[in-house]
Image: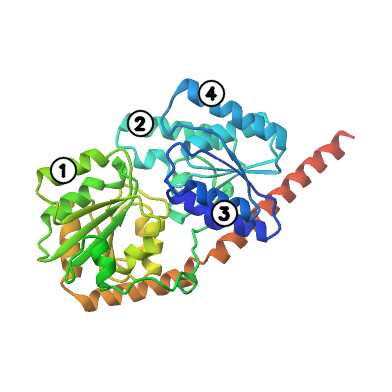
Amino acid sequence: MGGTATYACTVLPRLVQRGLDVTLICSLNRSDPDAPARIARLKKSGVRVYIVPMSRGIGLFSDIRSFAAILCLLLEQRFDVIHTHCSKAGALGRVAAALAGGKVTIHSPHCFAFLRCRSPFGKSLYLGVERLLGRLTTKLVAVSQSEASAAIRGRIVPDHKCIAIKNGLLDGRFLRKDLPSPHDFAARQSLGIGRDSDVVTTACRLVGYKGVFRFLQAARLSHAPNATFLLAGDGDLKVRAEKFISENGLHDKVKLLGHVSNMERIYAVSDVVVLCSDAEAQPYLLLEAMRARRPIVATAVIGNTELISHKKTGLLVEPTPESIAAAIDELLADRAKRNEYAEKAYVYFRERHTLQEQVSRLTDLYKGCLLNECSRHTSAALGLE
């Protein structure tokens, strides 16, 4: 489960605590092994959960089945606010909400497809679809200001229909206390890391726009004398990644960890955290690294540039393996610089990305949209009378 799942699992239980009646409609078709446990925790917190199979790619018959299931649920439940997330679910959900007569339809893109698509035709197609869907959207809730700006620039929604509510996390003080120290030999040994190795970590779905091969190529190019590169995550590119590692003789240098349930334990033994994406909305990886007080190297692309201030809270680099490798080597060679960036990033995180602020703003938005909708309908009814 990626960023959107993290969003759901952190935000939804706290909306219930604020007195909201919350239902989650989600798909588990590409979920991680933790999905059943996470769903169970959501249900225990008071969130009702419905599972609707949904494919990530476009498939006519499978999409019709998913759409029909969503529409039936919306007609049956008659929700006051429908908040959709991501591209596929956002498209099906907003059309279904319009047909079901939903009062308020809110959408959060979590990185628009047209921003991460490399094909000019694909970019134009996805942007055109988002503009059409924008007409069905009461409010577009971006998770970063840069994502909100992209929506307005792209004429998806006008300025007054767009708002940025930043992602938040619980502060590190509330995490488990049994995390290993940075040089815990047993923890390192369990990951195949040498006692004195520098550790460079990334975590993502193994898909194209996440820059998986930039990270692997940067590992190959790095001149750090004793560095181990950890790649956590699973996805379509796993076999190709394994082949790249084999063909380039990187077995001793790069470790594919697969799905990791507890990334905090990985951050705890990491010296540098890296994100190599083509585009982001507001990546939890960077927020988690900031919370863990780990120095960051990130590509200078939308989403990352809003979180990282170059040479203050981390290093922003061009999305090339050479630039990423050079930045990693620079940080591994300078412990004082790593500590300085990590501490400043932690302060930034503490001041601007609290979970309490995120939940408060979402609660106020839902209630405000409902009040406005009720006022509009009341006015229309009075006029008719």
Picture quadrant where residue 122 is located:
top left
Location of residue 52 with respect to 256 vertically, above or below:
above
Mark carried by residue 41: 3
Q: Earlier in the sequence, mark 4 or mark 1?
A: 4
- The amino acid sitting under disc 2 is Gly
**Labels 4, 3: front one:** 3
- State which tag comes first along the sequence, 3 or 1: 3
Callout 1 amino acid:
Phe
Give the spatial CA distance, label 4 vs label 3: 30 Å
- Left or right of 18 on screen, residue 134: left
For the residues labelled 4 and 1, the Cα–Cα distance comes to 38 Å
| Rendered-image quadrant of the C terminus | top right
* Residue located 27% across and 39% down the image: 237
Q: Residues within 10 Å of mark 3 (few under 14, many from 20)?
A: some
Image x and y of residue 167, in percent: 49, 58
| Three-letter code for the amino acid on which mark 4 is drawn | Ile
Q: Is residue 84 left or right of residue 349?
A: right
x%, y% of residue 298?
A: 29, 58
Q: Which of the two marks, 2 or 3, is nearer to us in this view? A: 3
Separation of marks 2 and 3 at Cα, in angstroms: 38 Å
Task: Please tell me which of labels 2 and 3 falls first in the chain.
Answer: 3
Q: Which mark is residue 244?
A: 1
Mark 4 or 3, nearer chain start: 3
Badge 4: few (under 14), some or many (20 or more) residues near its Cα, within 10 Å? few
Q: CA distance from mark 2 to mark 1?
A: 27 Å
Residue 320 visible in the shown view: no
Front label number (4 vs 1): 1
Q: Mark 2 — residue? A: 122
* Residue extending farthest right: 385
In the image, farthest residue toward the bottom: 336
What residue sits right under mark 4 in the picture?
64
Instruction: Identify the residue at horizontal 47%, vertical 74% (top origin).
Output: 173
